[in-house]
Structure formats: C-alpha cells, structure tokens
Image (cartoon, rainbow, N blue to C red):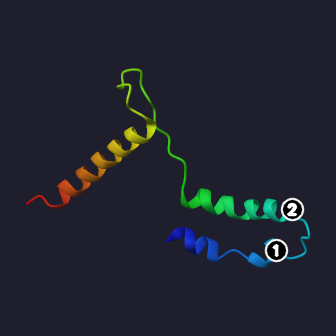
C-alpha cells in the first residue's frame, strides 16, 4: 500500500527527538504525516446539481460515477 510505504519512509526520530513538549511533538507529527496522507488520499471534487434527487450526496454521486467508469473499462476489455 502506498500509505504504508510513505509512512515507512518517514524519519520518526526527527519527530520525537529534541522535543520536550507534547504540543510541539504533535505539531511536528502533523507537519510530517499529513502531506503523506494527502498524497495517498487526494480529495475528490463532485458537483451536485439542482437537478439531482434530494438523496444524492457527493459520496453517492462519486461512487455511481466511479462504478460506471469501471464498467466501461471492463466492458471493453471482455468484448469478443
């Protein structure tokens, strides 16, 4: 998994060494880990239209759109 490789590549001693305050250590942790997290799990953008049904959330729309793209990919793959 990409996130595992990214976290293994961190120099964890740099986060914990020479820091006496827990708040500073937490800040250093977030400064190092969040960019890795953002790289592996980027945010997605989904537009919700006024014509969408009321139950249509951004998550539902994303999953539906993703499913149709995967179906198109596999449909073309197995055609004879």
Residue at x 59%, y 59% (from the top left corner)? 39
Q: Secondary structure at mark 2?
A: helix
Q: Is residue 64 left or right of residue 71?
A: right
Mark 2 neighbour density, 10 Å: few (under 14) some (14–19) many (20 or more): few
Residue position for label 2: 24
Q: Is residue 73 left or right of residue 5?
A: left
Identify the image quadrant of residue 40.
bottom right
Residue position for label 1: 16
Residue at x 35%, y 48% (from the top left corner)? 66
Q: Position of residue 63 (x, y in %)?
A: 37, 45
Q: Position of residue 42 (x, y in %)?
A: 55, 53
Is residue 72 shown above or below 32?
A: above
Q: Is residue 48 left or right of residue 67?
A: right
The answer to which of 15 and 46 lies nearer the viewer is: 15
Q: Secondary structure at mark 1?
A: helix
Cα separation, mark 2 vs mark 1, equals 10 Å
The answer to which of 60 and 74 lies nearer the viewer is: 60
Is residue 66 shown above or below 54?
A: below
Mark 1 neighbour density, 10 Å: few (under 14) some (14–19) many (20 or more): some
Q: Position of residue 68 (x, y in %)?
A: 28, 46
Locate the C terminus by quadrant.
bottom left
Pointers 2 and 1 in contact (C-beta within 8 Å): no
Q: Position of residue 74 (x, y in %)?
A: 22, 57
Identify the image quadrant of residue 8.
bottom right
């Amino acid at each position: 998994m990409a996130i595992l490789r990214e976290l293994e590549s961190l120099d964890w001693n740099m986060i914990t060494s020479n820091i006496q305050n827990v708040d500073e250590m937490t800040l250093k942790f977030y400064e190092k880990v969040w960019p890795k997290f953002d790289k592996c799990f980027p945010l997605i953008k989904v537009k919700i239209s006024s014509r969408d049904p009321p139950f249509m959330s951004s998550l539902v729309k994303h999953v539906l759109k993703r499913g149709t793209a995967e179906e198109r990919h596999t449909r073309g793959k197995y055609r004879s």
